[in-house]
Image (tube, grey):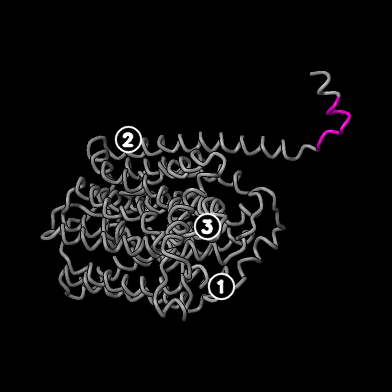
Amino acid sequence: MRKTAPAESTRHTWGEAIGVYLHRRVAVMFLLGFSAGLPYQFTASTLQALLTESGVSLEEIGLFGLVAIAYAWKFVWAPAIDGIPIPVLSRVLGHRRAWLLLIQIALGGVIAAMGWIDPATNKLALAAVAVAVAFLSASQDIVIDAFRIESIPEDELAAGTANYNAAYRVAMLVSFTGAVSLVTALEAYGFSKTEAWGWGFVVMASLILIGILGTLLAREDWAAQAPLFQRSAAERFRTAVIEPFSGFLKKDLWWAMLLFVVLFKLGDAFTSELRTTFFLKMGFEKATYAAIQWPAGFFSLLIGGYIGGIMVNRFGLMPSLWAAGIAQMLTNLVFIWPALALPGIAADIGIAQPDGRLALTFAALDGGGLAAWHATAALFGSIAIENFATGIGGVIFIAYMSHLCSDRAYTATQYALLSSLSNQARVVLSAPSGFVASGLGWVWYYVIGTALALPGLALLWWLWNREKRAEARTAQPPLPEGAIEARVVSD
């Protein structure tokens, strides 16, 4: 069982807080984080770009967010991944790595097939394949999350999480900006839309080899794991299904912890669901949007993620979580800027597209003067600010959930429960998001998203104050025997 310390008990020097990123077990999380982040955009931004370009309605695009439902329910099959070894392969690689290798191979195949389906003619088939991508991606998350928690000591966990999160974001960037740029280039060379998207997805699928490399380089000891799988079926069911949940329910304020996990990223989940569709609807052409947003999103997420890891090591978990929550809430409002500015700019300097709409392309921005600079700043600035806060909050929130999973025997199931709950908001809110944006407009869409962050912050404030009072009581020295007697007499 992992030995844990209270979240706020350890402080490190700046050198120690930064040097931990050079440790091997922390560094390998970068490759695995890339593997985890690669499939995500194929049920999010990349899928949104494909649907928007194919003329799918805003309401239907919102409903397509439900294909990611596997992320919200992965705790249901996490016990199977915890408790069932892969014949032969588990003995060779170890339990977690055996599962990882099989899932990664399957993911590559499904992603490669996804791009060949035209949503204009077969929405249901595309939705079915997207569901399969989400299921395999969620299953991969279960394994990697458990392996990260089991293999990294708690005082290095925030750093490992930062490496994981940074690579996750790099992969998201590649699987969106890289995919869209590649598709645009293929279309310019004369490929049809379906062929361009199909070959683009095939190239993206090949990048799963980076995750497979991480799986092969990681270390795991099957000899230490084997006794766990030599028990009876009933005993394995009890330890794989019943004990992980019953063990978590024994924690003090378990209900508040679970509720906080649901609420913390509520506002962020709502506003990020239609991010790509938002900027495309505001007038940007897909390749232009992808090219401008990637440096803003990538570098701000990368910097924010590492700052989040350093913040936890330097200032402690709860203060860092509070600061991140406030930043995430306020940065939702920055998108009101492009919501108000871009439609008018697109009408003034946009270039007519084959479908008749005026779009902000590279050519439009190149000759658009001050209006072009304003449009670029609205896109680049809003993405950079929001992603910086998301990078900080993502690492700190993952570190918080990892800290709650202190028993190594149940890490996959318990962490899957927590991460599933954190994804409930994204999946549940994806369905009405398109209707809200269509009915109330984009400005109110982001105002509502900002307000949705308040319940999580209120609960965090309550939990933090409870924790501080508990620490204060623990820090008080015991009363001398005479003082205890005097108190009893006076009472």
| Residue range highlighted in magenta | 478-485
Q: Toward the viewer: 205 or 154?
A: 154
Q: Amino acid at mark 2?
A: Trp
Residue at (58%, 70%) from the top-left corner?
A: 25
Mark 2: give few (<14), some (14-19) or many (20+) Cα within 10 Å: some
Q: Position of residue 185 (x, y in %)?
A: 26, 72
The numbered dot on residue 224 is 1
Can residue 266 be seen here?
Answer: yes
Looking at the image, is mark 1 or mark 3 nearer the viewer? 1
Question: CB atoms at circles 1 and 3 under 8 Å apart?
Answer: no
The numbered dot on residue 305 is 3
Check disc 2 and report its element: helix, strand or loop.
helix
Prevalent SS, magenta region: helix
Q: Amino acid at mark 1?
A: Ala
Question: CB atoms at circles 1 and 2 under 8 Å apart?
Answer: no
* Mark closest to the chain's N terminus, 1 or 3: 1
The numbered dot on residue 444 is 2
Q: Toward the viewer: 313 or 46?
A: 313
Q: CA distance from mark 1 to mark 2?
A: 55 Å
Q: Position of residue 333 (x, y in %)?
A: 41, 40
Q: Position of residue 462 (x, y in %)?
A: 56, 34
Q: From what the image shows, is residue 416 above or below residue 167?
A: above
Q: From what the image shows, is residue 299 above or below residue 396?
A: below
* Mark closest to the chain's N terminus, 2 or 3: 3
Q: From what the image shows, is residue 103 above or below residue 42?
A: below
